[in-house]
Image (spheres, helix red, strand yellow):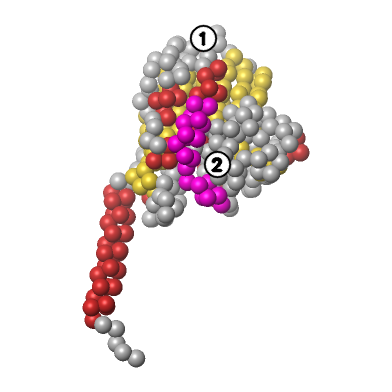
Amino acid sequence: MSKPPILLIKTVSVILFLIILTVSGFLLFLTITEYHPDPTERLSINGTGIKLPKEQKKFTLFTWNIGYSGLGKEMDFFYEGGKKVRPDKKEFFDYLQGIERTIHPYDTIDFVFIQEMDSRAKRSYFIDEKSTILSLFPAYCSAYAINYDCRFVPFPVTNPMGKIIAGLATISKFSPVSMDRISFPTDFPWPKRLFFLKRCFLVTRFPLTGGKQLVIINTHNSAYDEEGILRKTEFATLHKFIIKEFLKGNYIIAGGDWNNNPKGFNPENIKTGDVVKYIKPLVAATFLPGWKFVFDSLSPTNRDVDIPYERGKTKTTIIDFFVISPNIEVKFVKTLVTKFEYSDHNPVIMKVVLK
C-alpha cells in the first residue's frame, strides 16, 4: 500500500488546525461575552404607575408565557423532537399581533406577568417584543429581568438559533418600592452553560399599612430537566425566600411558568378534549405546605411542541399557576383558552383579596 501524499497530509492538517482554531475562537468569544448576573440585582423601573391606595385589598393578576411569539399552533420545535427552529416571518407577526390582541383587553388589570419575551433575537426576527408589549400599558410601570443572553446559539448546526436576548417582565398599575432580579442557582458545566438560560425570578414590593408589604413574584423555572434536579433546586430557593418574607408578616403572591404541575393537579379534570400528561417529579409535599396553589383545573395551560397543535393528539398539561400565602383569599381563577393559537401556553387570570 502506497503512503499518502505529503501534500494531502499537509492539507488535512491545515484544515483540522483551522477547524480547531475556529471552534476555540468561537468558544473564547462566548466565554468573554458570557452573561454573568449577580445573585440579586436591583432593576430599573420604567414608567411611574400610581400610588397604591392604602385601602386597596383586592387585586387582579394575569400571567402568560408568550413563547417569544414563535410557538403558535402551527409550530413544532427541534429541541422537543420537531423540525422547525422558528416560524416563517408572516406566522411570527401573526402570533405577535394575536398576543397583543389577547393582552389588550386586560390593560386595566393590576399586575401582569410575562415570560419568554425577546428584546433582541434572531428567532423573533430581531423585533423588540419587550417594547411592543409594554406599549400596551402606557400608564403602568414595569421591569424586565433578562434570563437568556447569548451572542450566538449554534444549534441546530444546519440552521442556528443565533443571538438571543430574552427575559420576563412584571407590569404594574401601582408604583412599587423596588423590583429585583434574583438568580436561581445553575450547575451547567462549561461550555454548556454558554448556550443555556440563566434562570431567575422577579420580585416586586409594595408598601402596605403597618409596615407590611405585598410581595409579588414572577417566576420562570427550568424546562428540559427530566430528572427534576434543577427544578428541585429552584423550588428550594423559592421556598427559602418566600417563607422568609411571610415570617415578616408580608403578603406573598408567586406566579408564572413553573414548568411543573401544581399541587392538586389531576389530568382527569381537564374538560377541553385535550390529551393531558403529568410532569415528573411532582411538587414535593414540603414545598410551601398550607399555601394555596391556584389554577383552573378544567383547562390546560401548556402544550408539547413536538408537533403542531392538534386537539386530542398533542399532549398538554398545567404548568402556569399562582401560589399565594395563607393570609390571602382567592376570589377567582380562569385559564383563557386560546387553543394555543399564538403561543404554546394559555394565559391565566386570578383575583384575590388580602385578609
Q: Crowding at label 2, few (<14), some or many (≥20) Cα neighbours within 10 Å? A: many
33 or 154: nearer the eye? 154
Q: Identify the residue shown where x is 28% and y is 51%.
A: 29
Q: Which residues are magenta?
A: 77-98
Vertical comparison of 197 with 355: above or below: below
211 or 181: nearer the eye? 181
**Residue at label 1?**
54
Q: Position of residue 293 (x, y in %)?
A: 65, 31
Q: Would you say residue 161 is visible in this rendering?
A: yes
Residue 93 on the magenta segment: yes
Q: Would you say residue 262 is visible in this rendering?
A: no
Q: The residue under label 1 is which amino acid type? A: Lys
- State which quarter of the image contains the C terminus: top right
**Residue at label 2?**
75
State which mark lies toward you, 1 or 2. Answer: 2
53 or 346: nearer the eye? 346
User: What kind of element bears circle 2?
Assistant: loop
On the picture, is 313 further left or further right than 143?
right
Question: Could you say which quadrant of the image residue 9 lies in?
Answer: bottom left
Q: Identify the residue shown where x is 26% and y is 64%.
A: 18
- State which quarter of the image contains the N terminus: bottom left
Q: Identify the residue shown where x is 25% and y is 73%.
A: 11
Farthest bottom residue in view: 1
Q: Identify the residue shown where x is 53% and y is 27%.
A: 98
Rounded to the nearest angstrom, the CA distance separating label 1 from label 2 is: 46 Å
Marks 1 and 2 close (CB-CB < 8 Å): no
